[in-house]
Image: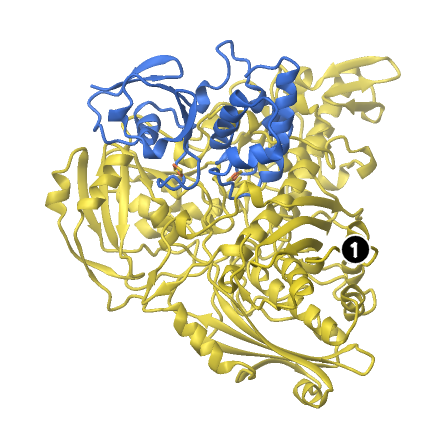
Chain colours: A blue, B yellow
Amino acid sequence: MISLSINGSSQSLGDIDPETPLLWALRDTLGLVGTKYGCGIAQCGACTVHLNGVPVRACQLQVGNLEGQEITTIEGVASEDGALHVLQEAWIEHDVPQCGYCQAGQIMSAAALLAANTKPSDEDINTAMAGNICRCGTYTRIVEAIHIAARKLDQGGTA
Amino acid sequence: MNNLQNGYNDPLDAFEPKQARQLSRREFIKLSGMGAGLALAVVSVPFSKSATAATDGVEYNLFIQINSDGVIRIYSPNPEVGQGIKTALPMVVAEELDANWSDVVIENSPIADEYGRQVAGGSRSVPTRWDELRAAGAGVRAMLIEAAAGEWSVPSSEVTTNQSMLIHAFSDRRISYGEVANLAGELSPPMVDSLTFKNPEEYRLLGTRITGTDNMALVTGKPIFGIDLQLPNMLYASYTKCPTIGGRVVKANLDEIKALPGVITAFVLEGTVGVTSFDPRGVSVAPGVAIVAESTWQSFKARDSLKIGWDTSEASSDSWSDYVEAAEELRGKEGAAVLLEQGTAAQVINDAATKVSSQYGFGFVSHAQLEPQSCVAHWRENMMEIWSTSQTQSEVRGSVAALLDMPKENVIAHQYRGGGGFGRRLDNDYVREAALIAQRVDAPVKLQWSREDDMAFDFFRVGGFYNMQASVDENGKLNAWNSHAICLSADGEKPNSGAGLRPMDFPREMLEHFKHTQTLLPSKTPTGPWRAPSSNSYAFVEQSFVHEMAVVAQRDHLEFLIESLGEPKWFKEGDSASLNTARAINVIKTVAERAGWGTKQQPVGRALGLSFYFCHAGYVAEVADVSVDKDKKITVHKVWMAVDVGPVLNLSAAENQCQGGVIDGISTLMGLEITMTKGRVDQSNFDEYPLLRISSRPKIDVHFVKSEYSPTGLGEPAFPPLAAAVCNAIYSVTGDRIRDLPIRKAGYTI
Ligand code: FES
Ligand code: FES
């Protein structure tokens, strides 16, 4: 019986195989499908979640090793009262997505960046976002939206 | 650079209705004899959520429902795979309806014959839907006006609309669309010829920036992609096919597999003999072993224990290296088959003082859409229900019905957002696999391909080669052209889908001496349409070669390119697929001006490169600002694009497509290649298929020229010009002419 702390609440995974990647436990067992499968080998970043605040690839983590750790997924990024994270707002307003499939992972990587660095430079963004592929090529808008979100944060927005 | 024909076989031509479809009518309405009335009947498709949800409110036609509380529901008919169509098409409806955009709720339409061509391909969604969507909007607006006029007992001509409100100015009365929705629903739909449409100057939505309708769902992780669908009691399947494409299962250790944790069942699908070719309507299924389990992970993990004996006697034995050798043999030669000839091109070039003979090549590429293929299928009582991300939704039902040998009425299809398409989801191969698996399972099943499946079993963008020869006269003007397409062919008669593009208007129309020949190399590897089929590779060849000619002629590239296009002329007046050189020259001049072409000295190690291409009715010119260091590391600093696709419907999405086209262009040019060895694809995942990362993005300046022509799609024309623009710049910096894609093979990195 494995249970994980996900988005602030404890979730039981039943008698799941402890080798199951967190990605598939989130998607199939818990129905948290915002975390995406793209490659399964830590190349694309579509499965990015936070483990104790650090961005990680959910396809690479076995649930058996995660007992007692804090996991945040895209579904838990907005604050509890429903207010969107400044990145989510910026993504919507700046119309970042094309197909949108990579964007949950992009936002998770960007959220970890903003949590550590509220005024990231283009270079900081390049480094933090290097593990996230966007096949549709929305990189221009991703960078712009991170800067917009940083400004919103500066003006008291929610992160 | 202009309308180039895809050999004989535009893969999407099969989907074009014979003639423009008239407005859909679900049932006969009183306007008998005229095919253009608007349907009033309620959309009712079995199992269709969107249709049955219409409890309160009136469905005026296939696209519009208005509730008495003022909510305006617009059904978007065509598949969304990231091209923004789910937002763009409803904008067209809402514009002519004069709806307040904040009242609009957008839903995917059902998949039904009444909706005609429900396909995302060929950048044709906008042009083929334009007339009917405008009529749908304007028609309902007319009905609402008539209802309000009746209510107020005033002539209809005195009633105007303004953003979901009906107004009678003389008596200063106003009423909302919602308040007359039911009344209007009792009226007969108007005739299309009687409708009044807005003048473009009156547009409030079209041409502005409207953000994507699914943005909120996307950024909060809501289940909206095909892969996200979960049904009660759903099971999960993997499907293992022969790594040598086209191999057949002889034996498999099914009993061992069935005993593994979570595995419900495992079985062999006999499938079709040999290699399957691209056919969205087809019935072929690649042979393999299905494992049905309680979770995706269990269905994947069980594959590690799978032992399958394969028979590869009918399989592909293609090796990319063989094609490279064959092309080398043909270097400098014409092809035996002469497809087009005028004048004496070979002779003129032979006698010319200034001429060039070059061979170009480009590899296979994968679609690599980020969401690997998946499909949910549910079989019960002779009904098959399918939830897919197909780009050819209107073919799904027919294809599955033919496969299962049952009436099309017994197949229900639902469209889901696809995580990228680029043409991969045009074929319904994975849908048919899911259907066959579901038929043997007593529950809904989600078939999930791994990334490795996705990369190995694609309908690839075909690789190929071109021998190019041309000459210039004593004035440095292009005077003869002789091209030879060396292309892959599955049937030995015609080039494969996406191969063997041949020049049509340009440069043939401008030259007295022109020749095009062809050689077919036998190949079994499945190929299919990939963003801007054929043009995606040929544009690189043509536009690099034009630059080569400008260089040997010692002419400025911009001046040479414009001169080569000749006098402003639309070759087939009124046909959007035919080159209009006035529009071509306009975008070329515009991009040159914006990029400051010829006006400033570039620093050492840095240069501008120019390219232009016309395809899918769109005109795109690009300038790339590129530097190259001594280790062959390139930096694309900036790309300018000038685009003419008629009036742009949604500026935000259009600009996004253009930016994406540039990124995709750099990605593909730099590093992407699929090779195969004796029928097996050599690459398996993104570690061997290096898509561009964020740090390599250039600045991108997108400019849409003002255009009076009808709107056309942008997904495809945004891609082709980039490769030549960058390679031409690299030449200008280094003197190294790149004739092979991807360029990492020549030692370049980014
Ligand atoms: S799915 Fe985990 S990094 Fe790609
Ligand atoms: S928006 Fe499609 S992969 Fe990023």
Q: Quadrant of the N terminus of chain A?
A: top left
- Percent position of residue B73, x then y: 59, 26
Residue B102 is left or right of residue B119, and the answer is: right
Residue drawn at 70 percent across, 25 percent down: B99
**Residue located 47% across and 82% down the image:** B329
Q: In this rendering, does residue B73 appear at all?
A: no
In the rendered image, which quarter is residue B579 located in? bottom right
Q: Residue B75, percent across and down?
A: 57, 32
**Quadrant the C terminus of chain A occupies:** top right
Q: How many numbered marks appear?
A: 1
Residue B248 in view, yes or no? yes
Up the image or down, B14 lies above or below B356; here it is above
- According to the picture, the residue beneath numbered tag 1 turns out to be B592
Depth check: B272 or A157 in front? A157
Residue B462 position, x and y percent, is 47, 63
Mark 1 is surrounded, within 10 Å at the Cα level, by few (under 14), some (14 to 19) or many (20 or more) other residues, namely many
